[in-house]
Image (spheres, rainbow, N blue to C red):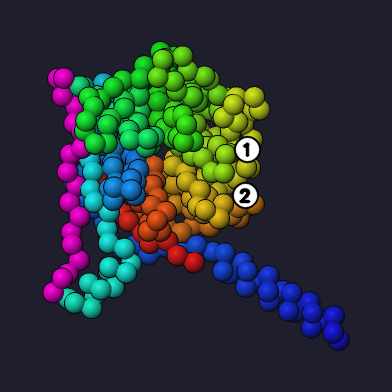
Amino acid sequence: MWHRTFLCLLCFLSFDVAARAAWNVKKITEVEGFEIPECVVVDSKNNKAYVSNVAAAVEGEGYDRFWADDGNGFISEFSLPDSPQRRRKRSDNPSLGEKKITPKDFARSSEEFRFSGPKGMCILGNSLWVTDIDRVLVFSLDGKHAPQVVEVPEAIALNDVASDGQFAYATDSAAGKCYRLHAGGKHEEIPAPRGINGITFHKNKMYGASWGLSDIYELDRDGVKPPRAFGLTEYFKTPDGIEVLDDGTFLVSDSEGNQVVTISPDEKTVTRIIECAAPADIGIDRSRGLLFVPRFFESGVDIYQLSR
């Protein structure tokens, strides 16, 4: 009899652990006023978020128009929303209300510094790194230095960019490559799957989402080992952005699948947590537990509170 009781207790404990491990999201606000927002990156230190705007001028239905050299690109910034504690204080005093978040220009294409299709972004040091079709732009966050261009001569369609804290890495979706970028221009090539899109780092490991192969991969940032697939193609159409939470849970946006999902740290369980139209390259604010989801075709960014 005791062993049956023990098994029941074990099953209960296992279920309880699984239940506590699940992540939940609650939409707290949305920010409007963008033009084809592709990526959100968060600067928690300075209480800001940055949004890349493709702002394609070419009409049509295909994706080629988002890679046109039209000089229309720009980058927006906005202040991060209040912490949960501040929001609770506001709810105690209705006269304070909930402050509307309004984006403003951080950088816009001009005759002096022209750019067209800004997409993936990351922060490295005091700089914002941004892919722009076949090159990478570097902006000073404090505005003390003029923007710079990192040329990538072999590039065809640079998409996302991420940092391991030492280098910036950029993906080339058309070539199925990833590059470790160097200021001097001699970049190291890293094997990547066809259609590689979003990339991120977690505990010294590099992960990427393949738009073309509908799967998630672990990449070797030193370029020695080939990409390792998770084997989750049945759950995705076109994976786009990818982030990893502190507990090892993956967050992935699926653009044509119209969803954002979590993948368990063991890479086996996929759970849809958000259903929305064409989510692009997501961003997270770890200090506040916030998830930012750009709606590519709807000119908005939704902000969700992550909780367990």
Seen at 58% across and 39% down, the residue is: 205
Mark 2 or mark 1: whose residue is earlier in sequence? 1
Query: Which residue lies most toward the bottom here?
Result: 1
Residue 6 seen in this snapshot: yes
Residue 185 in the image, given as x and y percentages of width and height: 42, 15
Asked whether 78 or 33 is in front, the reply is: 78
- Residue 229, picture quadrant: top right
Residue 202 versus residue 225 in the image, above or below: below
Task: Residue type at mark 2: give it.
Answer: Glu
Task: Residue type at mark 1: give it.
Answer: Ala
Q: SS at mark 1?
A: strand
Q: Please check the rendered image and state whether residue 103 is part of the magenta-colored stretch, yes or no.
A: yes
- Boundaries of the magenta span: 95-112
Instruction: Give residue 229's mark.
Output: 1
Classify the position of the N terminus by image quarter: bottom right
Prevailing secondary structure of the magenta residues: loop
Q: SS at mark 2?
A: loop
Residue at which label 2 appears? 267
